[in-house]
Amino acid sequence: MKRALMGTAGLVLGTGALVFSGAGIASAQTASGGAACQQIESTLSSIQSTLPQAASNPSALSSKIGTFASQLGQESASASPAVKSAVNTFIGDLKAAGSGHVNVSKLTSDANAIGAACKTPSGAPATGGGSTAGVQDPVLFGLGGAALLAGVGVIGLGRRNRSRSSARS
Amino acid sequence: MPGRLGRGGWVTGRMVATAAGVVLIAGGGSVLGVAAAAQQHAPQPGPDQAGVIAAPARTPAPRSTTARGTTARPSPTLARSLPVSISIPAIGVRSRLLYVGLNRNGTIQVPPLNDPPLTNEAAWYKYSPTPGQVGSSIIEGHVDSARYGPSVFFRLGALKPGNQVDVTLADHQVAVFRVTAVRMYPKSHFPTSTVYGNTDYAALRLITCGGSFDYQTRSYRSNIVAFASLVSAHPA
């Protein structure tokens, strides 16, 4: 009876892993949403490949789920709040799977949520190079200003000389 | 007038100097005028452009009915179809669309800054809904480049609520959006959920840079975001 239950759990968990990996994480792979998401994606791939094999051994399964949960928690530490939240939900449901309560659709939905969160940009884009910021054409301004000052200086000098000369005569 | 004729050379010299001074002043003034006229600064959105970000649950039927006889109907949506080009008549934008993804730091990639054919093109964030689908479709463009002056979204900050944005899709439909708000946000407090978050209607977000420029980081300190919602569609 126990063996049958474990076999069923393993099959369901294996199917679940395949389902959630196929649905949510495949899209996260292409999204490459930051370093944290890439690590999470890698761990989820490991979960997919490892857990079905460990499903026949309850203690190994539990240990592996614990390890993966811890790993996912660390990897999501530097991720955006949305990714963190999605990963925490996934971890909760993954732990439930370890105790035999497998909810395939929930795991699939969790993985989809991680994929979606990973695809949400985390900040503002850098859409400018600055060529129209501040004063443009400083050389032109410099030349114009210098010519203007020189002109004022030349005329001023001429007037000063003239008034000195008038005073002498 | 004794000696004046004798001082003819001095008088001539004085006249030449005065003439040179006048020429220098006129020339310098002209150069300054040209330099001032050549200044180009991207328009920044004001309070009158703040509008409303969320589209009403029901929007008036466009064009097909008169202003007095508008009838309410559900916000329209379109099937998924990749965007091909964007046109914003109010600010003279017409561009084909590049597709961009995410950088490793989680921000949206941008077109290259120093590759003029591409620098001046807008880009659609390829993991957002296609324009016309329910959700926030993201299109961005540079305000300017590092070396080549104004770029495709230089005048985005001049958009006003009510302006029209046309996005041509691969299925030969033109998704017609209406701007509802234009706002500027500091990069340090960029409201990602407001801009990128999901919506229950077909939304479009147009993003570029704005505000002052930080010469140390070589980046603008703010972003301008135009919020729009789908009002109709027609064949291209």
Image (tube, coloured by chain):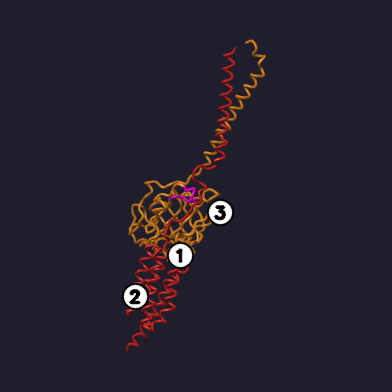
Chain colours: A red, B orange
Total label count? 3
Q: Quadrant of the C terminus of chain A?
A: top right
Can you tell which quarter of the image residue B117 is in?
bottom right
User: Horizontal and vertical percent for residue B141?
Assistant: 48, 55
Q: Is residue B39 left or right of residue B73?
A: right
User: CA separation, marks 3 and 2?
Assistant: 50 Å
Q: Secondary structure at mark 3?
A: loop
Q: Secondary structure at mark 1?
A: helix
User: CA separation, marks 3 and 1?
Assistant: 26 Å
**Front position in the image: A107 or B88:** A107
Circle number at residue B114: 3
User: Horizontal and vertical percent for residue B149?
Assistant: 53, 48
Disc 3 residue type (three-letter): Asn
Residue of label 2: A95
Residue visible at 58% across and 23% down in the picture: A157
Disc 2 residue type (three-letter): Lys
Residue of label 1: A35
Q: Secondary structure at mark 2?
A: helix
